[in-house]
Amino acid sequence: MPNQLIFWDYLVFAFYLVIIVSYGYWIYKKKKKNEANSTKNFFLAEGSLTWWAIGASIIASNISAEQFIGMSGDGFFAGIAVAIYEWLGAAVLILVAIFLMPVYIKNRIYTMPQFLTMRYNEQVALIMSIFWLFLYVFVNLTSILYLGALAINGLLGGAYFHEIMMVLALFAIFITLGGMKVIGYTDAIQVAVLIIGGLATTYMALTIVSQNFGLGKNAFAGFNVLLQQAPDHFHLMFKKPTAGAPQEYVDKYLILPAFGMYAAGQWISNLNYWGCNQYITQRALGADLKTARTGILFASLLKILMPVIVMLPGIIAYVLYKNGMLPAMEGQNKDAAYASILTFLPAGLKGLAVAALTAAIVASLAGKANSISTIFTMDVYKKYLNKRADEERMVRTGRIAVVVAMLLSIAFTWNDLLGISGEGGYTFVQKYSSFISPGVLATFLLGMFWKRTSGAAAVVGILTGFAASIFFNQLAVPLLGPETWLYSAFKNSEGVYEIPFFICLGWSFFTTVLVMIGVSLAGPKISPKAFSLDKAMFKLEPSTIILSITTILLLSVIYARFW
């Protein structure tokens, strides 16, 4: 494939790059020297992020290559049903803002392992610190780098994959080394570029659809063409396959199972991601409760818009490909859908689209690297490797951790050692993240809201959640067969029986909760480390109520239209 970018595209992209680097450097220099060497400032930007910076940073960190490339790929394959990740995420963010953030902020929690130490014990915190570090480095960072480099490489002719990966990593390191304040405020620009560039790309792609079908340049006409040409791509759920169902339908159900997805799996995945994840909560943990809540609810509103940017291009690519109008997709897997759409864009706009994609990738890399650095420095290095480390040494260690984490992710991404390309980028991330979600979520929710939950139950719960995930994902079918009252397994495209991983996630979570309750009942009626909760913690400001109701109403309209 020839290079798809020309001078004007490079000029637009260079303008974006200069703005981000200059603004980030200005924010960094503006901080006082003693602030730069403060751990709370470096890792949390304590008290300095506004609600809009918190909300923008959450979205910029969340929306990355795995969404642009992976979710567009699943949009190409399965359609609008994949938007459940975003729209249910918007609903979950409301729950996080109202119920979880008061617990964190009242108890001055700065890291997730710190929560586990305060509520349970250091053994629980250490186990989870190791789990999180491995997950963030070897699943999240690697997938972001791989998918981002894959997309941009396609636009540059397909010969620069490793070079692009290195540039993305270096750009992210530059931003991350400035600390959370630099990340938070540059994310505000990143998310603006992401939304403007993403919406412009979707709008232009819809006009291309309308033109190709003889309807002139009309985005609304283009969307109506999608509804007519791909009606099966506009259903929010896939029902359980019946005997003789086409393999393609079975494969869609395996990644987006109807009842299992809505009844348990998606709620567990989203609650863990948005409420128990250092990568996300870190943006709000340094703020006061009102600011944190408003920022999270602002992010919730922005989430509703995201499928238009990261999923709809995949359906557009499907319709064009189906009608022989997208040769760039020939011989490639579904993750090539977004990059193929970009080849249609005019000069300049293509550069803006690449800037939006780069903004999403770099913001996510920086946010993830900062979380890795925070957990390693504050919960491993300070506690176990150098208990006497002063503030300056801890900040220096945090910066070293950023570089090391990025180098490790490059090493594993270099030749796709984790097999990201095999099952699609978005499914890869969701599937392997779900192995620790059950134990983590059960430990956090029971720890917050059931005073009897013990430290022993937390250790057993984390290990049970992981073991149960392995059992349901890998061992259940060989041991129990493909069909029991617990589940129904189906043959995937490779002829192997598989249980939808969201159903595995649900059963793993409920198993973990039952085991933790059983262990806790054998202990004292009230754990000596239980948090004190009171009604005042959960009192809502009028702005919180208004933002929450607005989000719920918008989601209701969407579901009423496409259910």
Image: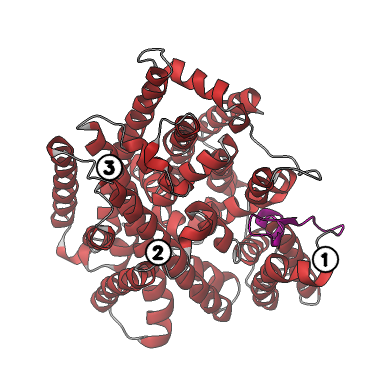
Marking on residue 481: 1
Amino acid type of the residue tagged 3 in the rendering = Val
Outermost residue on the top side: it is 215
Quadrant assignment, res 515: bottom right
Marking on residue 470: none
Q: Which residues are magenta?
A: 484-504
Residue 561: % across, % down: 62, 23
Tell me if residue 261 comes above or below residue 235 in the rendering.
below
Residue 359: % across, % down: 29, 46
Q: CA distance from mark 3 to mark 1?
A: 47 Å
Quadrant assignment, res 169: bottom left
Q: Earlier in the sequence, mark 3 or mark 2?
A: 2
- Which residue in the structure is indicated by mark 3? 354
Q: Residues within 10 Å of mark 3 (few under 14, many from 20)?
A: many
Q: Residue drawn at (54%, 54%), measured in percent from left and top? A: 427
Q: Secondary structure at mark 3?
A: helix
Q: Earlier in the sequence, mark 1 or mark 2?
A: 2
The type of colouring in the image is: secondary structure
Amino acid type of the residue tagged 1 in the rendering = Gly
Q: Relative to 239, is 485 on the left or the right?
A: right
Q: Residue drawn at (41%, 35%), measured in percent from left and top? A: 309
Residue 426: % across, % down: 50, 52
Q: Earlier in the sequence, mark 3 or mark 1?
A: 3
Q: Nearer the viewer, mark 1 or mark 2?
A: 1
Most frequent secondary structure within the magenta stretch: loop
Q: Relative to 18, is 57 on the left or the right?
A: right
Amino acid type of the residue tagged 2 in the rendering = Thr
Q: CA distance from mark 1 to mark 2?
A: 34 Å
- Which residue in the structure is indicated by mark 2? 142
Q: Residues within 10 Å of mark 2 (few under 14, many from 20)?
A: many
